[in-house]
Structures are given as C-alpha cells and as structure tokens.
Image (spheres, coloured by chain):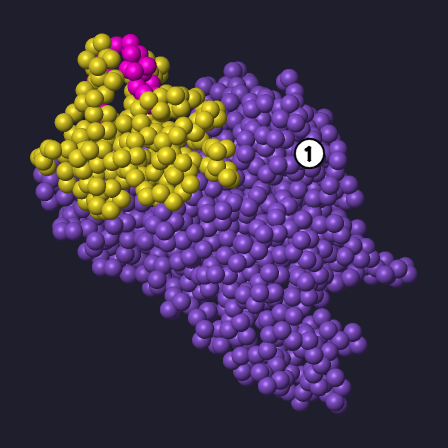
Chain colours: A yellow, B purple
C-alpha cells in the first residue's frame, strides 16, 4: 500500500490514453497517473479572488457515470460531445484483475496549451483558475482540440462547430451552486471548493490527504490516487 | 446532530459575491411563492463541523417560473427520492431530495427543517435519475389508446376512442371481425361469475380466476389500486408480480432462513467492518442503488473503515475498490458458502454465544433483535409420526397446555429437555434421544446438527472443485469473514441464487450470517425497518368497500398452493398410482410472484385456461430468460383470448396485444408510498406528479392512464369498489372513487394521520400549493388533514435517521427469528415425486439436482452470465439518450484466453447459440480479464426490436406517439436504429426440455435461470 497522493494528470502520459469515442480504451499498457510528488508550494499568498479547484478521490469513484450524465444534462452538448468522461483501464500487470476508472475533464491548466493554440484568442485563463472559451470569438479552427493533452475540448457540430469544454459550471458557481458533476456524485468522489477559502470536506482533504498548497497555482483538477495496488503501480511511475 | 450544524451555507461569510447570490435566490424564491412572505434560511456561519455536507452543493436556482417537487424516482426500483425542477410546465432537471436517506448516503436532513431552508441542501442522484426528461419526452411514447389492426405481432395498430375501448373490453364481442377474425373476444363482464372455472376441480376457484393481471414494475401505491380492481372488484386471485425475474433466488434463501417472514436482508454498509458480496452488483445496480449502497461502501472503504470481497464470475465495477475478487463458477455460490460453513464449523469459528441463545430475549441480551433456532430439537426418529418437524413440549409432556404445549424444546446445559423460553442458553450441537410420553424415547437432533450433517456430506476439496476455486480461497474467505465478530455480513442479491438450485444456494449464503451472529444487528445482516406509516386505514378505509370480493382457489402459477389438495392428485391416486408426478410443478414453498410459471400455465392451460390477460408495465418476452418461448403463447387466441397491455410504449411483448392503453410515467403520476429496501432504514417516500400528464384525456378531463382505465372498466362492468360512495370516511361519510386522486390523496391522508404528522406552516402549505400539480385536488381532503399532508408532501415523504432504528446494536424492527432448519420446507413435498424437501442445507437435491446447476455440455462449452449496467434499468432505459450515447451497445464479454483459442479478437462480431436457441444471437466481443475463463457475460438493456427500434403501421400515428410527425412518415413509424443496438442475453437462455420447452426454473421456489445457460460462441462476419 502506498500513501495516497494528490497529483495532477501527467500531461504527456494522458495524451496517449484518453482519446476514445466510446468510453472504452484499447489495452495498450498501463495508464499512468503522473507526478507522484505534490506540486511545489507556491509562494503566492491568499488572494481576494477565489481559486476554484476540484479534487477527485479515486478511492471513492465507483465509475457510475452519474457525473458524466449530470454534465450532459446540464450542457445539452451535441451527440458524442462530453465535457467530462470516465476513462476505464485495466491492467494485466497485477496479480489479479482490477478495474480502474479515471474521471477526465478540462484540467484548467496553469499554462493551457489551448490558450496559446487558439488563433482567435477565444480562450482565456481567468484569475479564478477557470479556462474559458468565448464562443463569440471562437471560429472553430480546432487547434485547441489537437493542442489539449487530455482530449477535453471538442468541436460541437450541433452548435456551429465551435469549441466546447468544461467551465466548472461557471454560471452555477456564480449562483452559489456546485458544478453539476460535483452535485451528482453519489459517493462525493468529486469535491469542489475555493483554494483560497477552503471549507468542509474539501478543506479536510487539503489538510489531511495532501498539503494545502498542492496544485497551486497549477492545474485546477487534483486527483487522490488509488491506495490499492493499482495506485501503487501507478505511483511507481511505470507505464 | 443539531439542525444548526446541518444547515447549508450557500455563501461563506467571507465571500460577498456569494452572499449576493444567496440574496438573489431568496428573492427569486419569494417571487415564486407569491402571496407569502418567504425567505430562504440564513446561511450557517462558523465552522462546518459535519464534513459530509458541503456548503452550497445542492442548491437549485429558484428563477421565476420554476417549480420544485420532492418526489420519488423510478429510474430503477431503488426508491431514491428526487427533487424535480419544472420550468413553464416542462421538466428540466432533477437532483436529490435532502430529506431522503437514499440521496444523502444515509444522513438525511432533519425532518423538522423547514422545506424552504432545505432548498439549499444537497442531495445526489445517479445517472438513471438524471435521464428522466429523455424518458418522459421520448418520441416513441404513446399518448392515446391503440387497437390491433392486423394479426397479433404484425405491428399494425389503429387509434381507438376511449369510450369505444371501454365498451369493447367490458362487454367483449366480435371486435376484430373487420380483420377476418370471427371469434368472439371475451369482456371483463363475462368473468363476473362465481361458477367454478373447472367443474371437475372446484378447488381451483371461480370463473373470475380466468382474469390474469400480470404486473411488471409495480410499486406500493399502484399495487393497492390494482389489487382493489383485480382481487376486490373482479375477484380474481391472479394478480401476479414478477418477483421471479426480479431476483427470486436470494429471496428464496432468505425466505427459508427467516421462515417466510422476510426475503430481503443485506449487510449494513453503514456499520459493517467487512462485507462478503455474493452476486450483488453494488457499484452499478442493487436496491438501494449505487446512489446509496454503493456510495456509502465507496466512502467508508476510502476512509479505511471497511473492507469487502466480491464473489462473482464477472469483474463488476466494484472491483475498483474491492479487497478481493473470487471469480466463482456460475451457479455454485451455494457450494462456496457450504465450504465456508464447513471450515467455520471445523475450526469452531462460529459465534457460540449467539447460536446458543434459544429465544428472542436471549438474543436481545447478546445484542441482536433476531435469534436463531440452532438449538431447537428436530424429531429425526423414523418411527415417530412427527419426523421432520420440531419437537414441541406436547410431544414430551401430553399434559402441556396452550402456548406451553406448542413451545419448541431445547436441551439445557445440564441436559434437561425444556421449553426454549425457559433458558437463555442451550446446547447447540447434539444428536440424542429424549424421553417421550410413557417413557418412550424419541430420537432428536438440534437444527445446528442437521445443518452441520448436510454440510459435512462433502469435503472442502469437493466444494472447491464445484465452485471452481482453490480450496485455500474458501479457507481464507472463511477465516476473514469470521475475524470481525458480528460486524461482518453477507450482501447477497440477484446473482446469488438466480438459477436452478438457487433456493438452497442462497439459504447456505444466508446461514453464514447466523454463524457469525450478526442478524438484525448494527453492521450485520439486516432487514428493512419498513414503512414509516400505514395507508390502509386511519381517516379513510381504502381496503374494504361494499360488495368487495374475497379471492378463492389456486393461482395459475400454482404458487403458494399444495398439489396434494388438487383434484388432479386425487384422481391420479384413485387410478392406482401415488398421485405423482404433477403435470407441472406446484410451489407451496415460495415467496411467489412467478411470472414465468404464470405464462407457462397460460401456455399449457394448466391448471386452467386464461380468458383475459392484462399486462401492466411489463415486457416478459424481453425480460424473462427464455421469454422468446412465450411468443407463440401470446400469438395464440386460444391460449390468450384477450390481451390488454397498459404501458408507455409498444414493446417486444405488447406488440402481441389486442389493445394497448397509454400510461403516464413516474414524472406525471404513478402515485406511490414507498418503504425502504433492506437494510436498516424506516421511511415512506411519497411519489406525486411533478408535471401534468402528457397523455390524452377523457371527455371529463381525466388523463389516459392505468387508474382511469380500471375505474372506467369497473364502472362499465358494474363491479364494486369504484364509482359513487365506495370509500368509507370518518363519521360515516362515503366518498366517490372516479379518478386516481380520489384514492391516492386519501392514502396520503391516512399516512399523514397515522404518523401524526404536524400541520404545515402557511409557507409550506403555500410551497406545496404553488409547486405540486397534485394540489389541484386538495379539495378532496378536509382542510386540517390537507395541511398535514402538505407537510409530508413538501418533504417527499416521512423519514427517520439511521440511528433512530437502533437500540444499542439491536435493530428495533425487522424479524425476530431465523432458521438453520426450516420445518415447513422439510414437510413440503416435491410435486414431481412426493418426497419431502431437505429442511436444511444440502448441496444436491435427490432426484432433482443430482449434478448441481449448470451441467457440463461439450457442445455448448460456455456459461452465459447476465447482469445490469450502471446506467440502465432492465428493459425500459433504451430511451435514456445519454446512457446510449455513453454506451451505444453492449458486448459479449469474454475471457481473452478463451477468445484467443477461438480466434476471436476484441471487437469481432460473434454469434451465441444455445440448445434453447440454436439460431442464436449476434453481438460484438469484448475480450479481456474481466470475466472468469469459461464464461461469457452479456448485459441486459440492449437488443431491442421494439420501443422505437422497428417500423410500425399506425394510420394517424402522429397523433398517438409523442414525437408526432418527427417519428411518422405517413402511416409508418420511423424507427431509430440506435435503439436496436446490441443483444439481449435472454433471447438465448436454455429451455426445459422435460417441461414442454418452457423456461428453466428452480423446482422449489420457481426461480428462473439467469446464469447457467450453456452457449457456444462462433465468430461471424455479420
């Protein structure tokens, strides 16, 4: 058993594995939940604006698809367009078979490749951490789609073929609501909060599962890796 | 926990922008409850001590024109609550009801919290619940009644006016003469007769029993309404459910274990230290569902507070966290459990203190509500007329009187034969002779000893061989299971026992719980706490009415009926034989709900013929393993002279119906009062409409649906119980039953009255009246009781917290006794050979299951195991658009070694064939290590041919189907090929070659076989 770590998705590793159309992946080696060491402590002090962050505890994720459907119910995205998905992997490198579910969504990266790839400056990294597409500016070039290492941006033909992705349900946050996927998660594997003013179980995770500074100011989606042998294998960093 | 601590802050005190958001919400809410001075509860300040509740998680925006209803979901039968959001009359979203334990991992909001405050409380729902709008607004829903316009199954229908429909079904007649069918179709009125259905066998009951009403997804509420019609008004005994294809196997094990008192018991996931999961799909299906049971297991497991092991041929989703997976051979859960019991007995690892407690008081003293009969003495003396039953005080003391005479006998520690009530501990493992009357000895054994002898008939190696696991796996599992004291428990569900031989398999699994002494105890094997209130009587009498009929006779499924009481038996005996075998099985020892044997009975006209078949919300040809066999039954007008279906669409079964009555969905009706599933909780969820019905209306404005249909048929037929002055109220007043609400609102009134629910505040009453469609009918109830009902409706039911059902570790509710030896089972005769069934655990049943379930068959080398998926319910969620987007098809899941041997690659198309269906079915292979070698796994939900998957011919159909012209091309329904994707494993299930090729069933309980069909897998180019 390894100690649980919270980590961001390792960008180079995930690029190979998250592209799929059906929610299933071909078995092509073990999926890697990248960096095991917590992201370095940031020097910035607590600011006045919120820093929205999602923690996903894989030790609670049942792979039930509630988040995926809740997201879909809210986004009403076109057929085959998902702002969040569950990637399923299994490994034959373990003594006995295991299943492994990884919820994937826009990572709201620190230096998002989609932002620099966009020819029309339609994608912005907000001060609150959220990476947002301005659909009035988006021309549907699709450069962000190929730039995203997580496969988390798609062009939606049902909406003028413009780029769509997770925005942490910004409208809901503004109305005092949790993102739809967080509200729907039965086992509360998805926790959401303001890194600058953490509360409740979100704060407890920052205090106990990981250093409060983890992920700041990096990607805004942090994962608590599996404590079982799958997690151990992943934390070895082998692929 | 105080209310204050449970309050949810929408905005933290240090966040001015979010505080602003709260004010907006409050203002919107105030606007919504026009005429009331309402504000949302203030946000809690200070530290959030309860980490389970996150601030602002669950708020729904209360914009203008938004309505909110707390009701109960029916995405599956798990019975979670829901909070439905409706905008301008259209259902737009759903989340969880925070008062409901099933939406809050068992920690609901305090029942006293004002509903307007609760709006900011969170509640989760699963994906199935979120799909409600796709279900309700599906274009293939029917809104008006249909009448067959071609031969049965032709797919040709026409619209029929309501009044004409009622007349034809009431009075019968040559209603299909225009199709060239000269036959007279029967009407309900024909069956309103007390003449025997079979003059040569009067015990079968009156002609009324020719009316068979089969129910698919039925729940309390509508069940009461249908029973009133079928049993009380028509007087037929044949209102038969579908428990058999739901999951009768584990229920039969519990039925034997609890002496019929309770069929659902599960490990308590809120307090168990260890759960051994037998065939329960805990992260995908189960009841309570993934939203409750799975969620609390995942959470507690993530916190290191419990461990669990899965026994299942298939690597279900819960393998992600499971501490072990035992990919057992299908159909051998019983062998595995008996192996564990053998180890436990041999190592003295059982809970002696618990097992030696001979009565309920003694069990209570050691921390349980239920005691076991392990120490009770059973007469084993072949010379004694009572052989096989329990020794009672009257057997040893003819002078014993009254209750004392009937008391069971145990051996006290000093060896005296005493009443089980007389001592608080008794001897456990004994075979002896006790002194009977006149000094004559009677040979006896304790129940425990009989169980032990059955278990010891086979060695661990034999059990391991049958279960297809290493002996060490059984030993290790038994060691682990017994290392937590009574805080380890079994969770068995549909996979455990849903096959031939399942009664005894599931009984063995249930007995594991008695051995660790966890029954009806916190963290152990527990029943549900039951309903929080009673609907039948109180303010109104909803059961009795003038002219109410009492049902008589034998059900066409022969459930709960003794063959030995039949004329057939007497006739056969009089002809010089033993009276055996019966023509088909009878099921005196079953929980019942035998839909398969009902259809088999209809097919064979045994023990009598069906005259009129009503099917409600039921798709048997799709949902029964081997259901395809009954196509010919439903096609045949001699076997089913009239078939009326009540449903929301045209499915694989009612395509053969003569009439299809459109029904409302659970968002528009399907009123209900829903008690919890096992384990633990005690509540009554209330389902009321969230939106107005989308179906057509009668001339007097009632929606087309089940209730309107039954009311109008009953009134046209002159049956009692419906119409004017049929409900007795307080003070001798009588009331009419002419619309659904006349019944259900009075049921709600009884529930509120009996539970002593307080009156709603003005604000809460205003909330209900502004938001709930049912409030349109408030005048049915007097003002005072309406106010109480409002309090309950506002919260979506009557709820209690988890801790309230316990006294220390003891469950306050549930059952009080379990049996290691079941006397009634031991004295029930097998109708095929007249020999009694074993009264305790036995691996093989003489003459029936010599080889156990799932015989080897070289031509058909693979076991086919079936299962549910996390985003689906059995047969009706193909309309869940997002589920179908995530998983557009299902798969033939194979072990990669098997696949490689057959040259089958991942993604190849394969054909599955069986002896039952040699043509087979085709699906896409998915290979890997997620199923035991030698097995293939296929989920349900896919492989539809109807529900929009096929073209239908319905002139004017654009007025019948919800999608209108979108789904109609002239007179033809335009199918959606996506709805036909994948395959349905039930289409290839084996049939019973001995019993007229009807589907396979367990001879004791009537359990259909979901996991031991043998198939061949062929690669195909199709």
Q: Is residue A124 above or below residue B840?
A: above
Query: Magenta residues: mostly which secondary structure?
Result: loop
Q: Is residue B877 above or below residue B909?
A: below
Describe the element under mark 1 as helix, strand or loop.
Answer: strand
Q: Is residue B560 above or below residue B132?
A: below
At horizontal 39% and vertical 55% (from top left) the residue drawn is B270
At horizontal 61% and vertical 79% (from top left) the residue drawn is B410
In this figure, what is the number of numbered marks?
1
Q: Position of residue B522 (x, y in %)?
A: 42, 63
Disc 1: host chain = B
State the residue lying farthest toward the right: B576
Q: Quadrant of the C terminus of chain A?
A: top left
Q: Is residue B697 left or right of residue A78?
A: right
Quarter residue B791 falls in: bottom left
Q: Position of residue A35 (x, y in %)?
A: 30, 31
**Depth order, front residue of B659/B318:** B318
Residue B555 showing in the rendered view:
no
**Depth order, front residue of B760/B378:** B378
> Badge 1 is on which residue?
B1015
At horizontal 33% and vertical 22% (from top left) the residue drawn is A12
Residue A156 showing in the rendered view:
yes
**Depth order, front residue of B422/B745:** B422
Q: Quadrant of the N terminus of chain A?
A: top left
Q: Residues within 10 Å of mark 1 (few under 14, many from 20)?
A: many
At horizontal 58% and vertical 71% (from top left) the residue drawn is B373
Quarter residue B551 falls in: bottom right
Q: Position of residue B327 (x, y in %)?
A: 57, 43
Segment colored magenta: A130-154
- Does the magenta-highlighted stretch encompass residue A174? no
Q: Position of residue B12 (x, y in %)?
A: 14, 43
């Amino acid at each position: 058993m390894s100690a649980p770590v919270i980590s961001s998705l390792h960008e180079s590793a995930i690029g190979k594995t998250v592209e799929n159309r059906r929610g299933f992946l071909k078995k092509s080696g073990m999926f890697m939940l990248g960096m095991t060491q917590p992201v370095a402590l940031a020097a910035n002090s607590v600011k006045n604006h919120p820093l929205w962050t999602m923690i996903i505890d894989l030790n609670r994720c049942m792979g039930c698809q509630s988040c995926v459907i809740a997201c879909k119910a809210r986004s009403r995205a076109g057929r085959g367009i998902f702002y969040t998905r569950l990637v399923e992997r299994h490994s034959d490198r373990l003594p006995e078979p295991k299943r492994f579910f990884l919820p994937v969504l826009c990572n709201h990266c620190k230096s998002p490749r989609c932002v620099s790839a966009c020819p029309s400056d339609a994608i912005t990294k907000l001060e609150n951490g959220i990476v947002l597409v301005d659909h009035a500016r988006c021309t549907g070039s699709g450069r962000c789609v190929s730039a995203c290492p997580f496969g988390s941006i798609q062009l939606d033909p049902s909406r003028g073929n413009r780029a769509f992705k997770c925005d942490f349900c910004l409208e809901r946050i503004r109305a005092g609501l949790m993102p739809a996927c967080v509200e729907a998660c039965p086992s509360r594997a998805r926790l959401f909060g303001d890194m600058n003013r953490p509360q409740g179980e979100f704060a407890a995770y920052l205090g106990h599962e990981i250093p409060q500074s983890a992920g700041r100011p990096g990607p805004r989606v942090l994962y608590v890796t599996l404590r079982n042998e799958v997690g151990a294998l992943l934390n070895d960093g082998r692929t | 926990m105080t209310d204050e601590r449970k309050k949810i802050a929408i905005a933290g005190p240090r966040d001015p922008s979010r505080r602003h958001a709260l004010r907006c919400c409050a203002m919107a809410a105030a606007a919504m409850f026009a005429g009331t001075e309402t504000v949302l509860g203030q946000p809690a300040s200070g530290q959030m001590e309860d980490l389970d509740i996150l601030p602002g998680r669950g708020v729904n925006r209360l914009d203008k024109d938004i309505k909110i209803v707390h009701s109960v979901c029916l995405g599956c039968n798990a019975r979670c609550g829901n909070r439905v959001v409706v905008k301008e009359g259209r259902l737009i979203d759903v989340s969880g009801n925070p008062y409901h334990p099933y939406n809050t991992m068992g920690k609901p909001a305090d029942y006293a919290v004002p509903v307007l405050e609760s709006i900011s409380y969170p509640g989760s729902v699963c994906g199935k619940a979120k799909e409600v709008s796709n279900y309700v607004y599906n274009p293939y829903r029917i809104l008006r009644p249909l009448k067959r316009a071609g031969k049965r199954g032709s797919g040709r229908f026409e619209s029929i006016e309501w009044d004409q429909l009622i007349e034809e079904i009431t009075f019968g007649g040559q209603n299909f003469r225009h199709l060239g069918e000269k036959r007279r179709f029967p009407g309900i009125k024909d069956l309103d007769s007390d003449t025997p259905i079979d003059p040569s066998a009067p015990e079968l009951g009156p002609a009324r029993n020719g009316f068979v009403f089969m129910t698919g997804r039925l729940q309390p509420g509508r069940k009461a309404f249908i029973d009133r019609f079928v049993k009380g008004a028509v007087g037929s005994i044949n209102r038969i459910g579908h428990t058999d294809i739901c999951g009768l196997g584990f229920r039969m094990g519990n039925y034997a274990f609890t002496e019929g008192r309770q069929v659902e018991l599960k490990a308590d996931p809120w307090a168990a230290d260890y759960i051994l999961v037998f065939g329960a799909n805990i992260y995908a299906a189960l009841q309570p569902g993934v939203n409750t049971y799975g969620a609390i297991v995942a959470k507690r497991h993530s916190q290191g507070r419990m461990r669990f092991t899965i026994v299942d041929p298939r690597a279900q989703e819960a393998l992600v966290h499971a501490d072990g997976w035992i990919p057992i051979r299908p159909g051998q859960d019983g062998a595995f459990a008996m192996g564990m019991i053998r180890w436990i007995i041999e190592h003295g690892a059982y809970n002696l203190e618990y097992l030696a407690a001979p009565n309920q008081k003694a069990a209570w003293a050691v921390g349980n509500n239920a005691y076991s009969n392990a120490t009770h003495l059973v007469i084993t003396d072949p010379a004694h007329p009572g052989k096989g039953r329990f020794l009672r005080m009257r057997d040893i003391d003819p002078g014993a009187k009254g209750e004392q005479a009937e008391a069971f006998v145990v051996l006290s520690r000093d060896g005296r034969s005493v009443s089980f009530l007389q001592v608080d501990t008794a001897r456990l493992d004994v075979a002896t002779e006790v002194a009977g009357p006149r000094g004559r000895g009677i040979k006896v054994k304790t129940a425990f000893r009989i169980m032990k002898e059955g278990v010891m008939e086979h060695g661990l190696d034999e059990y391991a061989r049958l279960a297809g696991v290493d002996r060490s796996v059984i030993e290790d599992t038994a060691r682990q299971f017994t290392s937590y004291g009574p805080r380890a428990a079994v969770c068995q569900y549909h996979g455990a026992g849903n096959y031939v031989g399942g009664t005894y398999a599931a009984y063995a699994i249930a007995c594991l719980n008695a051995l660790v002494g966890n029954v009806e105890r916190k963290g152990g094997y527990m029943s549900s706490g039951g309903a929080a209130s009673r609907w039948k009587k109180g303010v109104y009498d909803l059961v009795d009415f003038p002219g109410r009929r009492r049902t008589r006779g034998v059900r066409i499924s022969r459930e709960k009926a003794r063959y030995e009481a039949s004329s057939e038996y007497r006739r056969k005996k009089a002809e010089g034989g033993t009276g055996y075998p019966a023509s088909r099985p009878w099921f005196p020892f079953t929980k019942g709900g035998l839909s398969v044997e009902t259809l088999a009975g209809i097919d064979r006209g045994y023990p009598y013929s069906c005259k009129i078949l009503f099917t409600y919300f039921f798709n048997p040809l799709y949902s029964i393993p081997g259901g395809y066999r009954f196509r010919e039954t439903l096609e045949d007008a001699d076997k089913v002279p009239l078939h009326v279906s009540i449903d929301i669409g045209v499915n694989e079964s009612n395509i053969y119906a003569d009439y299809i009555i459109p029904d409302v969905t659970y968002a528009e009706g399907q009123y209900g009062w829903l008690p919890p599933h096992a384990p633990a909780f005690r509540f009554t969820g209330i389902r009321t409409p969230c939106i107005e019905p989308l179906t057509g209306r009668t001339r007097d404005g009632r929606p087309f649906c089940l209730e309107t249909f039954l009311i109008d048929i009953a009134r046209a037929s002159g049956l009692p119980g419906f119409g004017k002055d049929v409900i007795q109220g307080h003070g001798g007043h009588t009331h009419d039953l002419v619309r659904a609400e006349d019944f259900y609102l009075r049921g709600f009134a009884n529930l509120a009255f009996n539970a002593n629910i307080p009156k709603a505040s003005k604000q809460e009453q205003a909330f209900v009246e502004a938001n709930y469609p049912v409030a349109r009918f408030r005048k049915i109830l007097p003002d005072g009781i309406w106010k109480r009902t409002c309090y309950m409706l506002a919260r979506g039911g009557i709820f209690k917290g988890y801790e309230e059902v316990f006294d220390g570790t003891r469950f306050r509710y549930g059952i009080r006794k379990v049996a290691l030896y079941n006397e009634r089972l031991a004295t029930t005769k097998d109708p095929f050979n007249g020999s009694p069934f074993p009264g305790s655990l036995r691996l093989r049943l003489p003459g029936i299951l010599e080889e156990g379930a799932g015989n080897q068959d070289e031509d058909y080398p693979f076991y086919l195991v079936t299962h549910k998926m996390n985003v689906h319910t059995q047969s009706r969620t193909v309309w869940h658009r997002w589920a179908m987007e995530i998983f557009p098809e299902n798969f033939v899941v194979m072990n990669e070694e098997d696949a490689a041997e057959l040259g089958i690659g991942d993604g190849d198309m394969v054909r599955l064939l069986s002896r039952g269906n040699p043509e087979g079915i085709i699906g896409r292979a998915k290979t890997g290590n997620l199923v035991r070698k030698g097995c293939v796994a296929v989920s349900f939900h896919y492989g539809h041919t109807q529900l929009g998957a096929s073209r239908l011919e319905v002139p004017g159909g654009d007025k019948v189907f919800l999608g209108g012209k979108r789904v109609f091309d002239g007179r033809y329904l335009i199918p959606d090929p996506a709805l036909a994707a994948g395959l349905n494993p039930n289409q290839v299930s084996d049939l019973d070659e001995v019993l007229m090729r009807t589907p396979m069933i367990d001879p004791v309980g009537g359990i259909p076989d979901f996991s031991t069909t043998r198939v061949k897998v062929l690669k195909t180019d199709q």
